[in-house]
Image (cartoon, coloured by chain):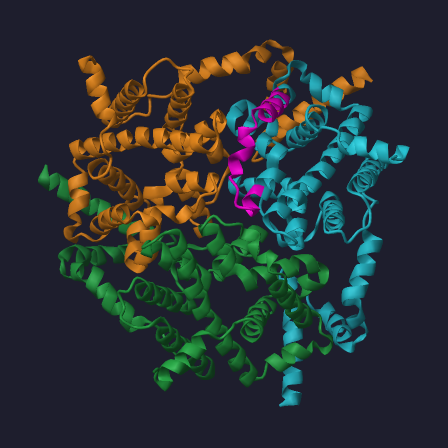
Chain colours: A cyan, B green, C orange
Amino acid sequence: MESPWDELTLAFSRTSMFPFFDIAHYLVSVMALKHQPGAVAMAWKNPLSSWFTAMLHCFGGGILSCILLAEPPLRFLANHTNILLASSIWYIIFFCPYDLVSHGYSFLPVQLLAAGMKEVTRTWKIVGGITHANSYYKNGWIVMIAIGWARGAGGTIITSFEQLIKGTWKPEGDEWLKMSYPSKVTLLGSVIFTFQHTNHLDISKHNLMFLYTIFLVTTKVTMMITETSMMTFAPLEDILSRMLFGWQQQFPLHEKESETKPSSNGSSAPKPTADTSNNIKKKHTKKTE
Amino acid sequence: MESPWDELTLAFSRTSMFPFFDIAHYLVSVMALKHQPGAVAMAWKNPLSSWFTAMLHCFGGGILSCILLAEPPLRFLANHTNILLASSIWYIIFFCPYDLVSHGYSFLPVQLLAAGMKEVTRTWKIVGGITHANSYYKNGWIVMIAIGWARGAGGTIITSFEQLIKGTWKPEGDEWLKMSYPSKVTLLGSVIFTFQHTNHLDISKHNLMFLYTIFLVTTKVTMMITETSMMTFAPLEDILSRMLFGWQQQFPLHEKESETKPSSNGSSAPKPTADTSNNIKKKHTKKTE
Amino acid sequence: MESPWDELTLAFSRTSMFPFFDIAHYLVSVMALKHQPGAVAMAWKNPLSSWFTAMLHCFGGGILSCILLAEPPLRFLANHTNILLASSIWYIIFFCPYDLVSHGYSFLPVQLLAAGMKEVTRTWKIVGGITHANSYYKNGWIVMIAIGWARGAGGTIITSFEQLIKGTWKPEGDEWLKMSYPSKVTLLGSVIFTFQHTNHLDISKHNLMFLYTIFLVTTKVTMMITETSMMTFAPLEDILSRMLFGWQQQFPLHEKESETKPSSNGSSAPKPTADTSNNIKKKHTKKTE
């Protein structure tokens, strides 16, 4: 005696990712790789290296979660069907005559469809990661959040690391600090699904999967159409940070810091703060002694 | 019919690390993080990243030993109590109003107490690592030494690696060469405890733990009070290196090298030696041919 | 009723690598390390670090395949006999008075013998890696190729990574692109042995091992005597790349690219291609719109 809504969401949650959604994910991932400077030239010069990078782009999240759970990082290579699918998509994207696929992909509706379908796979990956982590650590909810997050959004970490080794990417402290929008939304989803899994959230899994996917797809499509990255978590982050760290702002210490700050300049930007707080600390120490 | 000495050391070796010694370890680790330039500014800008770095500082040795034994590097996240403890300490150290904890910590006696207690956890970690490695490789004494060392002093490797990825640390050949004092003393401890474990050292484990801990704590406290790093292993290293590598010094080859060396100058310091030895080699080859 | 040929190859395939071939492998690996600039100076300054690097050079392939299969990367340390052997060779190569070993090794026949024997160990490693991977993933032939390759030629990856961490090697995109000759020949061998293992190649394993080893040794010795790296896979690669990617060359797209290319210059070599193809794409997009 299930309601039509339940039937819909149940049917949705049982959708197989295999042929179509996976294709969309590989398509979006490999197109993102292709738009990196130098990627096309490299594919002609050294196809094996390009193929390897493409596989990292397609299966990065799975590889990262394997590493974090001490499972063979090569396991994704044992799934021949998916490897073949991803390889074919890499092949036609990079080597198709007249660049037909790129032209087809440059249509906005095609991009929207592919991006939307890719977001659907994100939900499946988060849920899969959490279930998998739960089989290792019963009630290890921090591990569950971490693995769900890694599988859903860990591809960027793996590909950044590959670029670091190849020398095409120089890390900067600032880049590391900023989390991208997909990373944030995946973390949020991972937290929600973990709470659902540990029964702290009174909602059935298929309903949550449906709602979260709808949220993912609509925000992604909206962001692509309006060409903004407006859909941020700024309000949520603001409230959280005000709750956790904001109350100290009332105290005079950091006002002092911001007063003394303008005198600092030059390349060693982060240092002055530490120096200042050290100075203040020394002053206080003198007083207390 | 145990002697009072045995009773004392047995009781000591059964001390639980959990609340107080662990707190001291987290306190010292996070304070070390806080004194890095830019750490405070980063904590305000991106608390999640700062928290993650703090966790690496607190649990780095365990993570490294997990990687080396192919166990999930995330396992430390499953121990909720310790994570909560370390997180609380990170929180109060970085976000406490008026920086009260830092002021309290700047008292020398507090620092001495915390540092001394942290050294106690080092013994427990080495012993734990060796026992754990032994459960994998019976009589694999090199593995046991390596794991004991990794768990006792591997945190610095993990945090250096994190800084490499973040781009805040540029590796230099010279830095890699120098082992720090904690690293050396942990290696020594790891070797001693492994020999004890394989019954090559005729001393009971609790006695050895007590003596080694006393040694660790006294050297650490002495070094902090006198503010020197005098307590080096220079004599021991000297004897060892004289035993292993010193006898070749008598031979004329390296005298020749040092004679020809002064002509070399400039930035490529290591190269000349290789060139010189190549030259000498070529000469010899000509003679022998 | 085996033919003498079969008896010969069977006996060959049952040869133990242990004392002599392993010694040759360690000798060649450590000599390669010694010829790096600064390696000798470092060995005198910090023997432990030099020993560790030497172990990575000797056991790198095994370590990489362990990481890829989520086995303890330290496992090689549990094989005390091989560690002792490799350590002794490291010791006498770096610290032998009058540099006797280097002089002996500078004889071409000695080098040829050692290099030939080292190539024999490569076959054994590839076969061992494939058999090992097969025990994890039945019919996972991509994994088998990857593990065979990693164990046979993965040492360079591990040592490059170590140099990256030590800061003595700055990665450049171009270096990553080029596969060395040993890397290519190991990949070829890994593919052939995997096909043999999955019964797609109608040849017995011992025959294949014999033939492949003969091929490896003769090409290696020829290359060393003629001092060329002529023995490339250029024809094979050419055919393969013509089969896979060559047919697109007939189409006008890339001719346009090469026409527009000469205008590009400067340091950012890979970029112009991407820009060009973007321009072309935009043109096409305009046409199609």
Q: Residue at x 36, y 71 (%)?
A: B205
Q: Where is residue B24 in the image (x, y as percent from the top left)?
A: 56, 74
Q: Is residue A153 left or right of residue A106?
A: left
Q: Is residue C30 magenta?
A: no
Looking at the rendered image, the quarter that the N terminus of chain C falls into is top left
Q: Position of residue A66 (x, y in %)?
A: 56, 42
Q: Is residue B289 left or right of residue C129?
A: left
Q: In this view, does B38 lie to the left or right of C128?
A: right
The quarter of the displayed image where residue C131 is located: top left
Which span of residues is magenta-colored? Answer: A66-91
Q: Residue furthest bottom?
A: A289
Q: Where is residue C179 in the image (x, y as percent from the top left)?
A: 43, 29
Looking at the rendered image, the quarter that the C terminus of chain C falls into is top right
Seen in the picture, residue C219 relative to A169 is either above or below; the reply is above
Q: In this view, does B166 lie to the left or right of C18?
A: right
For the question of whether residue A168 can be seen, the reply is no
Seen in the picture, residue C280 relative to C50 is either above or below; the reply is above
Seen in the picture, residue C200 relative to B163 is either above or below; the reply is above
Q: Residue at x 70, y 49 (%)?
A: A179
Q: Which of C119 and C151 is in front in this view?
A: C151
Q: Which residue is drawn at 30% across and 64% down?
A: B195
Predominant SS along the magenta part: helix
Q: Which of B248 and C134 is in front in this view?
A: C134
